[in-house]
Amino acid sequence: MIVARALLGKIKEAYDTNPKLMNLMLDDYFRGEIRKSQKGWRNIVATAAKKGIPVPAFSTVLSFCDQYRNAVLPANQLQAQRDYFSPRFSASPGC
C-alpha cells in the first residue's frame, strides 16, 4: 500500500507541475526512473524468454517504451503486422 501511495503522489506531482502532460514518460521523474531501471528490466525479459517463462506485461511495456522513445522506429510496422496476420487468425462462423 505504501508503494502505491508513493507512486500516486509522484503521478499527482507530475500533473501538478505540468497539467498538459501527455504521457508520464515525458515527466522528468518517470523518465529518470525508466532510464535507471532499464538494464535490469531488459535482463528480466531476456532471462525469462531464454527459460521459456512468459512475462507478457514486462515485455509488452518494454517494447512500448522502446517504440515511444525512438523516433526512427516505424510506427506503421505494428499496423502492417496486424493487417497481415489478423485475417489469418480471425474466427469464422464455419470453424
Image (cartoon, grey):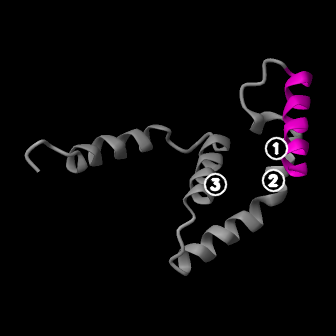
Residue that sits furthest to the left in the current view:
94
Q: Please give the label number shown on residue 35.
A: 2
Could you tell me residue 53's position as x and y percent? Answer: 54, 74
Q: Quick check: 50 above or below 6?
A: below
Q: Which residues are magenta?
A: 1-18
Q: Quick check: 84 above or below 21?
A: below
> Crowdedness of circle 2 by 10 Å Cα count: few (<14), some, many (20+)?
few
Q: Check if mark 3's residue and mark 2's residue have beta carbons within 8 Å.
A: no
* Of the pair 9 and 19, the residue shown nearer to us: 9
Could you tell me residue 60's position as x and y percent? Answer: 56, 53
Helix, strand or loop under label 3? helix
Residue at 50% over, 77% down? 52
Helix, strand or loop under label 1? helix
Q: Which residue is mark 1?
A: 31
Which quadrant holds residue 57? bottom right
Q: Is residue 10 magenta?
A: yes
* Of the pair 3 and 22, the residue shown nearer to us: 3
Q: Quick check: 39 above or below 20?
A: below
The amino acid pointed to by label 1 is Arg
Measured in 3D between alpha carbons, the distance from the residue under mark 3 to the one under mark 2, in whole angstroms, is: 11 Å
Query: Horizontal placement of 7 versus 74: left or right?
Result: right
Q: Which residue is mark 3?
A: 62
Question: What secondary structure is the magenta-colored segment mainly?
Answer: helix
Helix, strand or loop under label 2? helix
Residue that sits furthest to the top in the current view:
20
The amino acid pointed to by label 2 is Arg
Q: Is residue 77 magenta?
A: no
Residue that sits furthest to the bottom in the current view:
51
Residue at 81% over, 53% down? 35
> Crowdedness of circle 1 by 10 Å Cα count: few (<14), some, many (20+)?
few
Could you tell me residue 56's position as x and y percent? Answer: 54, 59
